Image (tube, coloured by chain):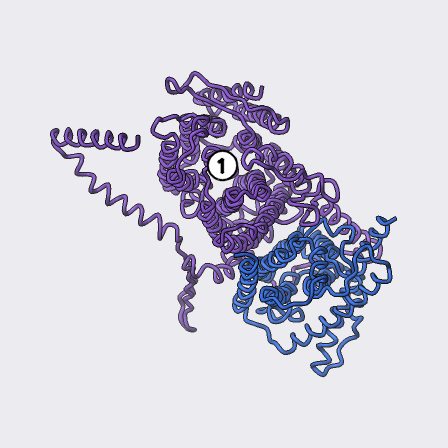
Amino acid sequence: MSMQFVMGALLVFWVQAVLALFRASQFVRLRYGVTMLTSVVILFAGMGFLLGSAPVEQIALPLGLPDIGMRMRIDALSAFFLIVVNLGGVTSSLFGMGYGLHEKRQGRVMPFYSAFIAAMNMVVLADDAFTFLISWELMSLTSWALVMSNEEKETRRAGLVYFVMASFSAIMLVFAFGLLAGANGSYGFDEIRQSHPTAISATIVLALVLLGPGSKAGVFPLHVWLPLAHPAAPSHVSALMSGVMTKVAIYGAIRILFDLVGPSMLWWWSVPVLIIGGATALMGILYALMQKDLKRLLAFSTVENVGIIFIGLGLALAFQANGMVTAAALAMSAALLHVFNHSLFKSLLFLGAGAVLHATGTRDLDQLGGLIHKMRFTAVLFLVGAVAISALPPLNGFVSEWLTFQSVLASPDLPQASLKFLIPVVGAVLALAAALAGAAFVKAFGVSFLGRARSEAAAAAQETDRFSLAAMMLLAGLCLAVGVLPSLAVDALRPVVDMLTTSGLPPQDIGPAPLSLVPFADGRSSYNGLIIMAFLLISGGMTAWFIHHFASDKVTYGDAWDCGTPEDSPLAQYTAESFSQPIRRVFGTSVFRAREVVDMPPPGELRAAQYNADSEDPAWRFVMNPLSRLLWQVTRRADILQRLTIRKYLAIVFAWLVLLLVAVTIWH
Amino acid sequence: MALMFSLFMQGIQMMLVLLVAPLLVGVVRKVRARILLRRGPSILQPYRDLWRLLRKETVVARNASWLFRVAPYLIFAAVWVAAALVPVFATGLEFNWTADLLAIVALLGTARFATALAAMDIGTSFGGLGASREMMVASLAEPAMLMIVFTISLLAGTTQLSEIANFVASQPIGLRISLGFAFTALLIVALAENARIPVDNPSTHLELTMIHEAMVLEYSGRHLALIEAASATKLLLYMSLIISLFLPYGIATNEAPLSLQLFGMLVWLAKLGIGAVLLAIGETVVSKMRLFRVAEFLGAALVMGLLSMIFLFVFKGI
């Protein structure tokens, strides 16, 4: 039943995309409204499927390649990701109903917007390699078009890098599916599940998955496109790209590794996944701390969270391959819950950044400040997102990190010595990343919303419109709900976890009180967000009551004291750069080669003193720049091929044909 | 009936941590003064200070937002709840299971987040300075703390503080390398988290060195009282944490009769007293570090925490 609704909704998306080619600048609110309702339909279909534990549904559309068609399928995993995608679709479209009206060139946004959501849905639904790849490419191209919708100069570079990296990830996927399909070329996911690949080809598939969907999700050092592309798009599209598209990439990795390759998994695969996850988490948040552009900071924090999810997946792999099913289910629940949580708070934060961008015209933190007075509601909602992403109780970010930590603690039972050494280190890295995330979001919220306005634009900011606020409120409410009632969320994930790891967590109602989260057993570890929240409210309320009745509640307003040396200029406040200076000095000098050069003229000289801080990006310096130089040289050599005689061309074609035939014979 | 008793004991603990905390600060100050051959204020002075602050009118900067005025309540509530969940005189109190050690550490993180934001609210340079330095310290202290939590919970097979305390209390005393590392690391983290010498000096107002004080510089009156009470409670919390993780001997269980619970309370107070004296001695013999030495100091704690965990992994299997 779900399938019919979903197919109908997909059709609506595409019709809308086509309709938006004409007169895109009219009926913008209506168009976003229809997109939102369409997403609501799929959202409910996905929720109905997941909560009602419906049977798997399949459909073959008479589209695409002959004999193969276009197969689609809803199972628990797809249903979960349909919820993630369309929850993002609903809130971004709702935000767009207000924010989207300000776009100058609607024709560059509207046609691609609903196509982008449709393509992400199709990736999640695809049941054969062709459908998957075509949807994947549609997703990349539509989001690329959305990135290119504004005409700032830096957008061109972002677009180029994104285009190259998106093609790269698609090529890796082509290879991965080619290997999985085997020599007979059976590209349906059902057939791939039946054929068990050899250890070697399965391992190559793992590498290709880490490179392909991995680069799309933003793992270090292939993340370079992400902080360029995500901020360049209109903010509600940034929210979709960061909150949802990276999750679709993670879906690809989970689908291929845990479902298609499934039983052929080897324990040592978790080693590269864990190392990459840890490096991504730590580097992502360190980058985020160095940023002074609000949306880039958020984009880098997406890199961090993708790392956390990969750590969860790596742990699940390690436990699964060793037959520790409960621990595997726990790690998988942690990863999936973090997928959901991150899609909530990252969308919320990007939408908040969009509201700030519209109100002030800048994303430069050093031009902002004091917005809490001008944008009261946006400030509260952004704060909710910031607290949630910093993994602080009682909000949802803490729950998924807590689950990840709990699964780290299950690792001493693993038989492999190398994992015994690696996982504690990864746990330390995760703890470090979580603590640094707190610093990054104190900076993001503190510099932009608190203090005094650093520019006239910030001083003149106004609250954003109601649609945008409604979208953010929805997300903030969900952040709170998942944080306070985590056991319900984990219970809802059970069908997905069951499907991927063969055995789910123990039912969550065994705890000492209803609604507690209990990963292993009562007495080993438990967390009850509801009671913690109630405790905080009660003790805060009691304190307020006590002070109201027994202490003075007189307030006098005066100047800031500032240790007796107040400074009038708002420029004397700490900026984004100065806030992160201590952390830069501690962590950045080795990793980023951060340098500070102070040029202080001696007394008597009249030139101005200068302070320069710069740093280098290791991903560009050690990976991307050498690669692009190599590519440049190779293409220059290959240039010869364009000036050959016809005889030589024929010879090349013939030789190539023979080579391929030989290869096919050997493979058989 | 058992539930009522249990709830009652939980309530007792909530009030007890609040009431004892200023006394602890008073004792530390008094002992410190005596070592420096000063007479020092009475050990009850912190209570008088709090009361005086509560009765005074509060001066708030003109451009302060709601966050500045809400933050003290949140900070106080978070620290208080965290302290109420650490078993001090009895394990297995009614609500001990609602939050394990990870959650307690994270609750303190929430309090710190609120403090740092409140510091940036007025838009003074000192507020930003304090917040920025505090987050740098926290970015090292928090993972070190989590490493210690990992080590201990791996050893006890649980992250529930009550269970850990029961486990340690029921084991024969033995030296373990990993526990030694974890203990040292926890001492360092506790000093850093409570803004004590050598990381920070709670009694300084020297601009260039302060961290915590710089953050709360703009607070006065009842807001300051709440923040002072929160930091006293946090000091108590960390001491109780060290006690219940490493020296829980004498602690009662929740089923124990009232007399044993009272005994547990006395033992706890005695241990706190010893802890206060040791802290005061430590603070007089060590001097404050330069800010960027702090990173190395806490880095050492992080490495020790990690080492303790790896030692445990190595000796548990292979």
Q: Residue at x 14, y 34 (%)?
A: A643
Q: Position of residue B290 (x, y in %)?
A: 54, 71
Which amino acid, by three-letter code, is at mark 1? Answer: Phe
Image point (51%, 33%), residue name: A102
| Side (left or right) of A568 relative to A228 | right
Q: Chain of mark 1?
A: A
Q: Quadrant of residue B76?
A: bottom right
Camera-side residue: B132 or A527? A527
Q: Is residue B20 visible?
A: yes
Work out which residue is located at the far right of the displayed protein and give it.
B1
Q: Nearer the viewer, residue A53 or B102?
A: A53
Out of A477 and B238, give the one closest to the viewer: B238
Which chain appears blue? B
Q: Measured from the top left, where is residue B117 in percent x and y?
A: 62, 54
- Which of the 4 image quadrants contains residue A163? top left
Q: Is residue A517 left or right of residue A440?
A: right
Q: Is residue A296 visible?
A: no
Mark 1 lies on a secondary structure that is helix
Relative to A128, residue A276 above or below: below
Residue A205 point in image, percent of width and height: 40, 38
Residue found farthest to the top:
A62
- The vertical placement of A14 against A429, above or below, is above
Q: Quadrant of the N terminus of chain A?
A: top right
Give chain A's shade: purple
Give the percent coordinates (x, y) of residue A328: 56, 42
Q: Which residue is mark 1?
A: A258
